[in-house]
Each structure stands twice: as C-alpha cells, then as structure tokens.
C-alpha cells in the first residue's frame, strides 16, 4: 500500500537522477502528496521526460474516474488485469519520492510513520500511467508488492522501489520480475498526526513527533534480499 508520500527533490536532482533532457520545471517541495493530486512521473517517450499526472489511474476507455481506488496496482496482477494490462505493456513510469507514510496501530490510535531510505537517497517508485483523451486526463498508479521484513510491522504491502539499473530496465520493458520487495535498508520515524489530513502541507509534517524515537528494525536493516 502507498497512500501518501513526499517529494522534496529539486529539478537539478531529478535531472541528474533520471538523465532528463527536458527544459527546467518550477518544482516546490511536497510534504503530503495524496490521491487525486498531481504528481511528477518520469516516462520513456522518445527520450526521458518528466510529466505531471493525476495520482489515481483513469484508463483510456473510462468515461469518468473509476469509483474503485486506482492509486495502487498490485504487482502480481499488472500483466493480467484489464485495468493494468495495457499500461504495464506500453506505459510504465517511475515516480520520484523522498519518503512515504504508513500508519501503525498504537495505544493512542494509529501513529503515522515517515519511511525513507536509511542512506537518505531518493526513492523511485515503479508506476503505470495512461492517457484518457475524452477526459483530457493523464494519470498514474504506484505499483505495490508484498512487504519486506522491515515493512511487515507496518503493512503487508509496500511500494515497489527501483534502484540502479532497475530504473532503466523498468522504463524500457515490462519486467515483472523487478516488482519485488526492495532489499534497501529503510528508516522509520514517527511524525505528527497532522499528516492524516491531505489538507495539511508543510515541512513540519515530516518532523519527528514530540517525545518519540525512530523505529529500529535492527538486523532487518541488512541488505539481504533472501530475507525479504
């Protein structure tokens, strides 16, 4: 599951990370990106380009946005389900992020956690996109897979995080074998419950919650794919 994330990357960082050839875009930091909002996605379309898309895929055959949630596509069914099949074959993307949020049950109610790479580097989510000409809409979804051992205390699903050559390969071909739990070490930090509302935005949403300590999965930080 991925229902909220952040993107603080500058245009220069995005150009360097994905080797874009686009003219500069005026980007602002985003601290609480929510479904149906616009997100930045990188596509391979006669070159490597950044595009703004609605988060929540609306297929080309739909007369209106679907009532069912289409913000996430399950990795196990992207090649077969009618909603995802054509985007998986022809319209894959990478969605840059700095971190994402997940909620964990606690005595005081569900506690939001900010989840980021332990080394502080950007995240690259595997995504699918589509264009609905009738609605004049370009939209996308984040591909999710089974949770790694690090993520299981928080949720049984997680976004597919691509790294290194996996980014290039995903943009070039429908490689379903890439859609697996990431072995990258992650860091988990409790944050303010203000992030629960998509109306809230700002850097204070990613600050450590008062009186809390980061969640330490200990040995689960090991980069050991076989243990995921």
Image (cartoon, grey):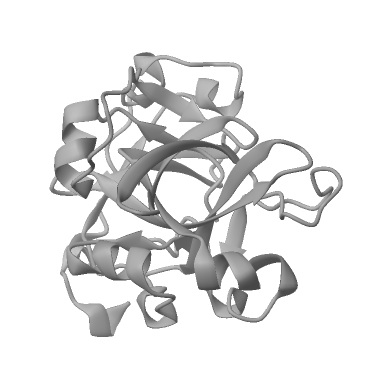
Is any part of residue 120 visible from this angle? Answer: no
Give the image quarter of residue 11.
Answer: top left
Q: Nearer the viewer, residue 114 or 40?
A: 40
Placement of 170 over or under 155, stated as above or below: below
Left-right relation of 144 to 227: right
Q: Nearer the viewer, residue 113 or 88?
A: 88
Is any part of residue 146 visible from this angle? Answer: yes
Question: Considering the image in quadrants, where does the C terminus appear?
Answer: bottom left
**Residue 58 image point, x, y percent:** 71, 49
Q: Nearer the viewer, residue 113 or 142?
A: 142
Give the image quarter of residue 100.
Answer: top left
Left-right relation of 217 to 76: left
Q: Residue furthest front?
A: 46
Placement of 5 over or under 207, stated as above or below: below
Instruction: State the residue at coordinates (70%, 75%).
Output: 81
**Residue 209 image point, x, y percent:** 37, 25
Placement of 140 over or under 107, stated as above or below: below
Question: Considering the image in quadrants, where does the N terminus appear?
Answer: bottom right
Instruction: State the residue at coordinates (18%, 47%).
Output: 19
């Amino acid at each position: 599951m991925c229902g909220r994330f952040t993107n603080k990357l500058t245009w220069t960082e995005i150009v360097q990370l994905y080797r874009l050839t686009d003219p500069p875009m005026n980007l602002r930091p985003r601290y609480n990106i929510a479904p149906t909002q616009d997100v930045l996605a990188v596509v391979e379309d006669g070159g490597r380009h950044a595009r703004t898309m609605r988060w929540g895929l609306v297929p080309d055959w739909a007369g209106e946005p679907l009532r069912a949630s289409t913000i996430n596509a399950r990795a196990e069914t992207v090649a077969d389900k009618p909603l995802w099949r054509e985007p998986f074959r022809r319209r894959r993307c990478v969605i840059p992020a700095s971190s994402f949020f997940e909620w964990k049950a606690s005595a005081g109610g569900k506690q939001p956690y900010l989840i980021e790479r332990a080394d502080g580097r950007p995240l690259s989510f595997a995504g699918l996109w589509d264009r609905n000409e009738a609605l004049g809409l370009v939209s996308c979804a984040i591909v999710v897979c089974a949770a790694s051992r690090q993520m299981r205390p928080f949720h049984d699903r997680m976004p597919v995080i691509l790294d290194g050559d996996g980014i290039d390969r995903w943009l070039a071909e429908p490689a379903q074998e890439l859609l697996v739990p990431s072995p990258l070490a992650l860091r988990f930090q409790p944050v303010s419950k203000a992030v629960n509302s998509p109306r809230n935005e700002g850097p204070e949403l990613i600050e450590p919650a008062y009186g809390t300590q980061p969640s330490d999965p200990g040995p689960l930080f090991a980069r050991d794919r076989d243990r995921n």
